[in-house]
Image (cartoon, rainbow, N blue to C red):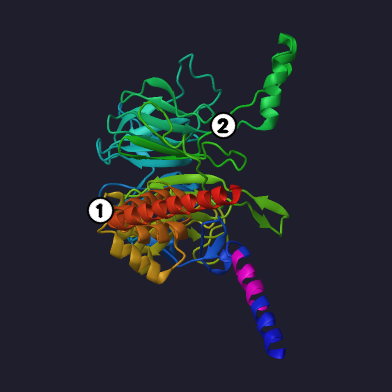
């Protein structure tokens, strides 16, 4: 009896401890713990894909202290451009952040006059044109210049009737391979302003949809029965604005930092401005809002910046929690990096994210630093397997996925990868096992169909003989039953 009671108490304690570790995994990330999400969307402890390496200030690279760095960008030669906003300059350094390669604060206009930056909020360097694009916010313009500081184009507030905003405050800027220029503007909810290579305003691109809440739907129905006078007095429901974007090939990825927006949090837009992610049920950031006990508020995700790495990973920077959520190109969660804290690897006001090689870089506009995160061996194993898988080399990705599972048996993305690879190899039973672990009914059903076909094919003769025997036995039993009934009737 005592032994049984001891076992029950031990089992109960283990359940309590396990439950505590699951529920607090995300909340305790501020203590340096890493986590991911399981099949049921619950936060569980996980191996780290990246670890903080160091935080670098402007003084560390010989450029003087940063003051509110708001954007960072790597060009084709791996030089890092930093929009040092309150110092009114763009600082350039190497990927190792060891020394300053130059400072851009003054430029020469086409007429030979000189101009100075004023609170630049965004910076971009095109591999196609070689130009530097600067969102010169307080000067209310976008500058396009050579690396020799010669301005080739200055874009100011459009005079077009399509542009109805009272201000022109550029926050982010990028250019596509055709030379078209896209600008995220402060307090603009109609999408990014789009300009031709010559600076002509072409309209807005990629506006967000209005979140269809019950209140909005009810308001729409009530408006159907209102007079024009009442309609004019009612406030309109408008979508949230874009806060960050990046370009990868022919696609532009956008994000919004609104903590109330549920649709269009992250978008993948084609040339026509259509959101490729719209048909998918996707969410970005933590599955559930985190609770801040010190402020008694729920901290809903607010994706303030987005970046697509060279291998297609999507890095989403959440301002609320100070975390980078890294997804593969199909939006499968790979890693959660960073935190909201004063220690190394934590942020006070995360502003921008970039990647280069096997590192992630995050600018903090309050700490005035750039934090470097270095990929771990576990992270390298995941990225190797994921790259092979996304390139269509499913069987080649099998062993790397197994390597990942040897480090973390609960890693859902690896279970999915193994299930898919085994399905293609024709190992249907194995595929069913890993599909079940990954919580993928789609792969499980396909594997089950294959397993059923294979079973029938390999046991066809036995199945036919069994069915024939069963049928014959049934006929004999039926005949005997009829004979007995007829005898009784006689």
Residue 14 magenta: yes
Dominant secondary structure (helix, strand or loop) of the stretch shown in magenta: helix
471, 26: nearer the viewer: 471
Q: Residue furthest top?
A: 228
Give the residues in magenta. 13-22
Using the image, tell me which numbered label, if any, was put on residue 393.
1
355, 37: nearer the viewer: 37
Q: Position of residue 421 (x, y in %)?
A: 31, 56
Q: Residue at x 41, y 35 (%)?
A: 276
Q: Residue at x 52, y 48 (%)?
A: 482
Task: Mark 1: give few (<14), some (14-19) or many (20+) Cα within 10 Å.
Answer: some
Residue 407 magenta: no
Reading the image, the residue beneath label 2 is 187
Q: CA distance from mark 2 to mark 1?
A: 45 Å
Quadrant location of the N terminus in the rendered image: bottom right
Q: Residue at x 49, y 53 (%)?
A: 480
Q: Earlier in the sequence, mark 2 or mark 1?
A: 2
Q: Residue furthest bottom?
A: 2
Quarter where residue 273 is shown: top left
Left or right: where does residue 456 sit relative to residue 228? left
């Amino acid at each position: 009896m005592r032994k049984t009671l001891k076992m029950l108490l031990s089992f109960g304690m283990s359940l309590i401890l396990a439950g505590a570790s699951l529920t607090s995994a995300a909340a305790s990330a501020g203590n340096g713990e890493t986590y991911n999400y399981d099949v049921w969307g619950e936060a569980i402890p996980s191996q780290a894909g990246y670890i903080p390496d160091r935080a670098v200030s402007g003084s560390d690279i010989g450029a003087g202290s940063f003051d509110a760095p708001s954007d960072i960008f790597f060009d084709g030669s791996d030089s890092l451009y930093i929009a040092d906003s309150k110092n009114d300059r763009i600082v350039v350094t190497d990927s190792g952040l060891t020394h300053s390669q130059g400072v851009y604060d003054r430029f020469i206009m086409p007429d030979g006059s000189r101009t100075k930056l004023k609170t630049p909020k965004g910076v971009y360097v095109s591999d196609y044109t070689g130009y530097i694009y600067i969102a010169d916010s307080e000067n209310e313009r976008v500058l396009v210049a050579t690396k020799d500081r010669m301005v080739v184009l200055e874009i100011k507030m459009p005079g077009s009737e399509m542009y109805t905003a009272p201000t022109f405050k550029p926050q982010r800027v990028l250019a596509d391979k055709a030379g078209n220029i896209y600008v995220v503007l402060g307090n603009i909810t109609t999408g990014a302003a789009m300009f031709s290579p010559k600076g002509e305003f072409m309209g807005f691109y990629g506006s967000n949809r209005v979140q269809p809440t019950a209140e909005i739907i009810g308001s729409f129905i009530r408006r159907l029965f209102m007079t024009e006078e009442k309609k004019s007095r009612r406030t309109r429901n408008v979508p949230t604005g874009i806060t960050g974007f990046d370009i990868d090939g022919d696609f532009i990825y956008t994000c919004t930092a609104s903590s109330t927006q549920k649709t269009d949090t992250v978008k993948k837009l084609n040339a026509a401005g259509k959101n490729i992610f719209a048909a998918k049920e996707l969410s970005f950031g933590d599955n559930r809002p985190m609770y801040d006990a010190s402020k008694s508020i729920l901290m809903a995700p607010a994706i303030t910046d987005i970046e697509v790495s060279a291998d297609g990973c999507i890095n989403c920077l959440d301002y609320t929690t100070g975390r980078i959520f890294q997804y593969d190109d199909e939006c499968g969660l790979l890693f959660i990096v960073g935190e909201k804290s004063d220690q190394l690897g934590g942020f006070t006001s995360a502003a921008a994210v970039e990647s280069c090689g096997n590192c992630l870089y995050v600018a903090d506009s309050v700490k005035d630093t750039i934090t470097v995160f270095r990929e771990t061996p576990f992270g390298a194993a995941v990225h190797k397997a994921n790259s092979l898988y996304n390139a269509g080399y499913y069987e080649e990705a099998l062993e790397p996925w197994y390597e990942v599972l040897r480090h973390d048996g609960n890693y859902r993305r690896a279970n999915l990868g193994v299930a898919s690879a085994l399905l293609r190899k024709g190992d249907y039973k194995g595929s069913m096992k890993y599909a079940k672990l990954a919580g993928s009914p789609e792969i499980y059903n396909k594997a089950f169909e294959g397993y059923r076909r294979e079973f029938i094919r390999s046991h066809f003769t036995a199945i036919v003989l069994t069915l024939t025997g069963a049928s014959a036995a049934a006929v004999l039993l039926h005949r005997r039953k009829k004979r007995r009934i007829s005898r009784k009737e006689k």
